[in-house]
Image (cartoon, rainbow, N blue to C red):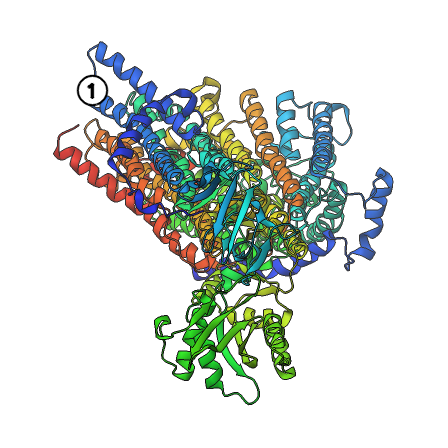
Amino acid sequence: MITASEIIQLVFYAVMLFLFTPPLGKLMAKIFEGEKTFLSPVFGWLERLSYKLSGIDPKKEMNWKTYMWAMLAFNGLGFAIVYLLQIFQSSLPLNPQQLPNVSWHLAFNTAVSFMTNTNWQSYAGEVTLSYLVQMLGLTVQNFVSAATGIAVMLALARGIARKTTIDIGNFWVDLVRSTVYVLLPLSILFTVVLVDQGVVQNFSSYQTVTTLEGTQQTILLGPAAAQIAIKQLGSNGGGFFNMNSAYPHENPTPFTNFLEMLSILLLASALVYTFGVIVKAKRHAWVVWGVMFFMFASGLAVSLWSEYLTNPVTGVAGGMEGKETRFGVANSVLWSVATTDASNGSVNAMHDSMSPLSGAVEMINIKLGEIIFGGVGAGMYGMMIFILLTVFIAGLMVGRTPEYLGKKIESYEVKMAAIAMILPSFGILLFTAIACISDAGLAGLNNSGPHGFSEILYAFASTAGNNGSAFAGLTASTPFYATLLGINMLIGRFGVIIPMLAIAGSLAKKKITPPSSGTFPTDTFLFGLLLLGTILIVGALTFFPTQVLGPIVEHFLMLNGQTF
Amino acid sequence: MTTKSVSSSISFLSGEIAFQALKDSFKKFHPKLLVKNPVMFVVAVGSAITTFITVQEILSGTSSGFNIQVTLWLWFTVLFANFAEAVAEGRGKAQAEALKKNRSQLTARLKIASGEKSIPAADLKKGDIVVCETGDTIPADGVIIEGIASVDESAITGESAPVIRESGDDRSAVTGGTKVLSDRILIRITSEQGNTFLDRIISLVEGSKRQKTPNEIALTIMLSALTIIFLLVVATLPPFVQYAEKAAGQTGGALTTLPVLVALLVCLIPTTIGGLLSAIGISGMDRLIRKNVIATSGRAAEAAGDVDVLLLDKTGTITLGNRMASEFIAADGVSRERLADAAQLSSLADETPEGRSIVVLAKEKYQLRGRDVSDVAGHFVPFSAQTRMSGVDIPKDGHKIARAIRKGSADAIKKFVTEQGSVFPKEIQAVVEGIARKGSTPLVVAENKEVLGVIELKDVVKGGIKERFAQLRQMGIKTVMITGDNPLTAAAIAAEAGVDDFIAEATPEDKLQRIRDEQANGRLVGMIGDGTNDAPALAQADVGIAMNSGTQAAREAGNMVDLDSNPTKLIEVVETGKQLLMTRGALTTFSIANDVAKYFAIIPAMAGTLYAASAISKGPLSALNIMHLASPQSAILSAVIFNALIIVGLIPLALRGVKYRAIGASAVLWRNLWLYGIGGIIVPFVGIKLIDIIIVTLRLI
């Protein structure tokens, strides 16, 4: 049974998430609108220096296409750097373990993964990548990929808030501001706390020690704390070590565990508020937040129920297999739900070992498009697909051309939202299908039956949703998986970003119709209900068969006493 | 131009239309037509595939009743969608025919060498000379070449007072649709009858040349997107199932034959709304025609639902076009009773609404019993454009004219009394000016050379209009009254009618400016107008309804024509536009919500045996068969049959439109969500189960 202290911890988590959202959201809105904050005197010089060094005029606005090209060019550059660092790492410094160059397909997969804020790891960090790659390549991408997500959300918010203009902001400014004023200060603060709690941050090579039992154990070291802070805050999730936050050097104490869990959702949640401030519809933002929170809480409830259900095979309720032994079942479940909601992908327990229904929750969280808080910025702009869909279908029912915050939703917006909805689903379903019937795909499986199917499905869902967590049990470093998963990440990231920027551009051009009592309301309980219904029905309709053939059939089989 | 409402002439679905529609729905199987509707095109392709397979099976002697039935019902799905569209088109055509017939009923008195002859107004040509006398409607725009007449142009100008038109000066132009109130004139027709214009737009509503409206295009895109997703879902199922079969060691254990996959696909893609979409659009136009409004494009009908601001002319829309006597103001030394009596006497033969209102007022206020014209042995003097007075001459005691009672404009009466050597009292002049300032019309009454007093004719706000505006407000629509009155009068009437705003002393430029201002603020503006001076505003407005009685210029400028020339129509047009959009939204919601039940029918049917412990036991996924459908085959067939029949079942709703109520957006939404959202989830569960029971009872599988 779930204990009272566990319930208190869960409630405390939810309360903290709620309490931090408005102040942080408000602060970010100020920062992104270019207003003075208490951070300006501290980091202002860094912002100005960045513009000066790169010759950027922060006052120059961009239309959506220019914004998109700037974003793509920047991401392309990031990809190239990470890729090159990996394939030449043996000739580069800061490689005390003398790790060899990374193969092309793994380098491609990893470079794409960190550029797209997925942080899917087909590799094991400690035996594959040098400290230089981790720091100069991955940590940097942890920051800028998160900043890219924020930038896209800001562009979208401006497109909605502005009228009759083609300008949606300046990508470089959004990138610099979110890095300098948000991600960097928070990460520094968080790193200091982590180091204080015992997370390693050094350049030593691994230590081999003899344990009390007399066996040899390798203690993993490295500049981990700095990367861990941003991996949690920036919905990255790629661990410094393969064990991710289940490894004590990434997550040493219950306190770090709580902070790391909170920081998974913190920025994404606050950015919903920021969005509300920018589009001048705070009530609407709260409704969206409410829908996200409801889905988070429901997923958590189902997952907890399923974990504490007595497993007829083992006769154990609340089984600890694969869970975070130091923090218990509830904390493992909470982390698994939060990390799949937020496209974070870090783990403190192995999702593979959880009950089938927990797996189903994790997968549906990801498959819905990482919109339950989602990635930083990405969650809100991903949610926009469903918001537009809801506004379009339900909006018609009030007898007007659908409007969203005064902007008419017409065929162009519908077309772009449809593309953003179709492409990630396309990646998930088609690639899973290919893997299911090809030898290369089946070769990577460690488990059979529906569980094996879930492993494949999870990998493609995780990459399309730019989540990056793994169900484990799938050997994903083969050229087949590394390449397909890499392509899938690109589809899942830019297949959504580009249509969303197009929508931002199109909405910015429109006039704003003032609301009246005949306008479809987007700031009411009813809208929340409609949004939830749209997400569940459209999402469920798309993924019902796969959920059934994976975790759900496994659940039924488990009840019959059969496991895989 | 007169037109009877044509709505009565066409029943909901006459046998003739149904038969023609059935024929047409087979013609619509042409691929060129099918491809216009992506959803139904996919169904047709799927049906073709299953047909191919079924035919092959029959030829090889392995045919199953199941595949044959699935194939048939898939084709029925397409047929039913075609039928829906054909019925809507058929009704549209019938409406248009009726319209054309009724339209030409107005006759013109064409002057020919031997006198005159009645011809349909539609046959008038430029240069024809026509005769118009009291009570005639001027058949077309023209110029008076002989005579002088008072003409009621309220339908065009909104001014309720008759105007004088006479030959040879700058007031010689007359407009088609206006009415001659007195005298006789000869008119030379200067423009071709609106025939060609109306004919052009009527052909538009017949359906065949219909273009998709912006919202319809957006919806089609969304439906196509859903179709693509479900195509993907179904196409990837065989690999997933193949994996599961291998894992469970049950090759061929699941039911994923091509016909079953096609059946699943057809059930999932939004066929209900896809099949009814064009019928909804056509019937929207059709409903407008039933209200005697012709839209030049479907776009206009749709935009009507979006209107945020309505510009309404005061006269005819908010107030009764005719003024009513509201008060008698007697001159010094004259009793009100005497004034009322004289006023009534002078108006007994006056058949104008104003005249009748004077008789009624005198009767109600001063208990002067309504006298009949025959009771008074006098000679009635009708209104004429020259004298601009009307009245009665009553003989008494041998005098031929003992009492000459006249009523008319202040100027006319002044002339009348001064000619008899009397003076026009100053205090009456003051009263007249006071009334005029209030926006009412003063009518002075005189008996012989004595001025008795003034009758105040006031604008009367139409009954029920206030409630109508309140409803509009609830729908979020702002009403703006436009009037030529001074601001004081305008404010008084605006308050009485309950409009949100008004423009007093409005010029055409004011109207245009107001429309532009509202549009700049992102609002959509609807207006109704008829005068040539309205043309720019009608063209600028998002929804411009021209009255059919209006000038050619006005009709060309607007995007709708109201054949009844009834200004309140604008409100009904807005409601029809809203209903059109609501129907689309409701059926889309219904269509998508339906999929939940279909999944629960088909997925357990397909995969119910997977991972079964033994060949005879049920698999774990049969737990999802919550409807307890008899067999996998009956489950799939029931879902397909339900999917086809629901299209037919909803045709009446698509043609009629969902029920419209003037309530706020939230209330409308709740209602429609319950009906079509929740209903859309529940109905197919019940329907599929019932069909399954019937199939099993009839042993079809």
Categorize mark 1 by other alpha carbons within 10 Å: few (<14), some (14-19), many (20+): few
Name the quarter where the C terminus of chain B is drawn: top left
Which residue sits at x=40%, y=20%?
Answer: B31
Whether residue A495 sits left or right of residue B26 in the image: it is right
Whether residue B528 sits left or right of residue B578 in the image: it is right
Which residue sits at x=36%, y=76%?
Answer: B370
- Give the quadrant of residue B495: bottom right
Asked if one can make out residue A300 in the rendered structure from this viewpoint, the answer is no
Q: Residue tagged by mark 1?
A: B64
Q: Nearer the viewer, residue A483 or B296?
A: B296
Q: Nearer the viewer, residue B59 or B134?
A: B134
The local secondary structure at tag 1 comes to loop
Q: Position of residue B535 (x, y in %)?
A: 61, 47
Three-letter amino acid code at the position of disc 1: Ser
Which residue sits at x=50%, y=88%?
Answer: B335
Whether residue A102 sits left or right of residue B674 in the image: it is right
Chain containing the residue with disc 1? B
Q: Position of residue A313 (x, y in %)?
A: 32, 40
Can you name the residue that lies furthest to the top here?
B60
